[in-house]
Amino acid sequence: MSAPAAENTFNAWAAAGPNQPLEAFPYDAGPIGDEEIEVAIDYCGVCHSDLSMLNNDWGITQYPFVPGHEVVGKIVKIGNHAQNKGLKVGQIVGVGWNRGSCMHCHPCMSGDQHLCHDVEATIIGHHGGFADRIRSHWAWAIPLPEGVDITSAGPLFCGGITVFNPLLQFGVLPTHRVGVIGIGGLGHMALRFLNAWGCEVTAFTSSLAKRDEALSLGAHRVIATRDSEELKKIAGQLDFIMVTANASLDWDAIIGALAPKGRLHFVGVVPEAVPLHVMALISKQAEISGSPTGSPSRLADMLAFCARHDITPQVEHFPLSKINDAVEHLHEGKARYRVVLDMNA
C-alpha cells in the first residue's frame, strides 16, 4: 500500500527558466524506490555546475529546475532492498554529483561506477538538493566518518572528489612535484590535499594577490600563470599538473613545465580547444588526461583522508532565506571559495 501523498511531498526551490530566481517548489517525489534511501538535508553546497544548469549553458536543463548536488544530511527512510546495506536511519551521509548507476555493467562491477553509461546525475533529469529532502541509490549515499565537519562537508562531494580522485587514479606520490592551476573552488582543495599527501606543491594563479592565501592553503611556491619568465624557470620540473581553472593559458609553456613522464591533467573545463604540439609530449614521454568526479569507494577514501588530516573546504554560509543571494554571490565570483546553504536556517 502506497504512503500518503503528503509523506512524499518534497519542499524544494526551483527556477522556472534560464536566469530566473529560485522560488518555492513543492513536488511529489512518489514512493521511495526499493534501492533508494531518503535524506533530510541539513546543508547543500552551491557549485558552478549548478549555475551552468540554472542558465542552461549546457543545453540539457529541464525546467522547473531544482539545483543542488553537494548534499549532507540524515537518512530518514530506507527502501526495501536497501535494508542491511550498512546504512541506518539517522546516519549522516552525503550525496554528490551522482545519485545512482546501473550496478551491473563492466565499469560498475570494476568499481568505476561514476563511469557507468547509465550513471544518474543528481541534477540532470532529477530534482536536486535545494530542498528539504532528496533520494539516491543507497550505494551513492556516503557516510561521513567521525572528524568530518558536517557544516562544510558538502563541497567535498563534488569539488573535493574531483581533485582527490586523480591522486589515486594516476598514482601521484608524496615524492612528486605537483602544480595546481587555479586557486578557486577546486584548486584550494587540491592544495590542501596535495600538501597533506606529502607533495611539493606549486600554485599557479592569474592573481598574485592570492599568493599569501595560496601558501596558507598548502602551496610551497606561487607562480603567475601569465608570467613567461617565471614559467621558463620551472621548465621540466613538475611530475603532475592539475588544471582546475576555466581559462585559456600558454599551453606550450605549461606543457614545458612537465618533467619526463609528467602528466597534464584537466578537471576544469577550459573554454577553448587546447593547442598541442605532439613532439612536446613525445620528447619527454608526457601525457595529457582528464577526469570527472569519482566512485563511491573513492568518495569514502577521500572522507577518511579528510578526517585523518583535518582537511575542510573553505566555505561561506548562507541561510536558506538568502538562497538567491548565495547564487548571485557565486555568479559574481565573490565566493572564497565555496558556498554552502544552511537548509534549516
Image: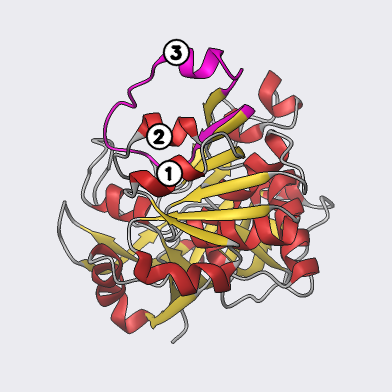
Q: Amino acid at mark 2?
A: Ala
Which of the 4 image quarters holds residue 285? top right
Quadrant placement of the C terminus: bottom left
Between marks 1 and 3, how big is the CA–CA gap? Answer: 20 Å
Element on which disc 1 rests: helix
Between marks 1 and 2, how big is the CA–CA gap? Answer: 6 Å
Frontmost residue, 4 versus 220: 220
Frontmost residue, 64 versus 9: 64
Residue under numbered circle 2: 253
Q: Amino acid at mark 3?
A: Val
Mark before the other along the chain sequence, 1 or 2? 1
The image position of residue 307, as x and y in percent, is 76, 68
Element on which disc 2 rests: helix
Residue drawn at (23%, 59%), measured in percent from left and top? 15
Residue under numbered circle 3: 278
Between marks 3 and 2, how big is the CA–CA gap? Answer: 14 Å
Residue drawn at (33%, 38%), measured in percent from left and top? 270
Q: Which residues are magenta?
A: 260-286
Query: Do the CB atoms of the residues marked 1 and 2 lie less than 8 Å apart?
Result: yes
The image position of residue 162, as x and y in percent, is 55, 47
Whether residue 267 appears in magenta in the rendering, the answer is: yes
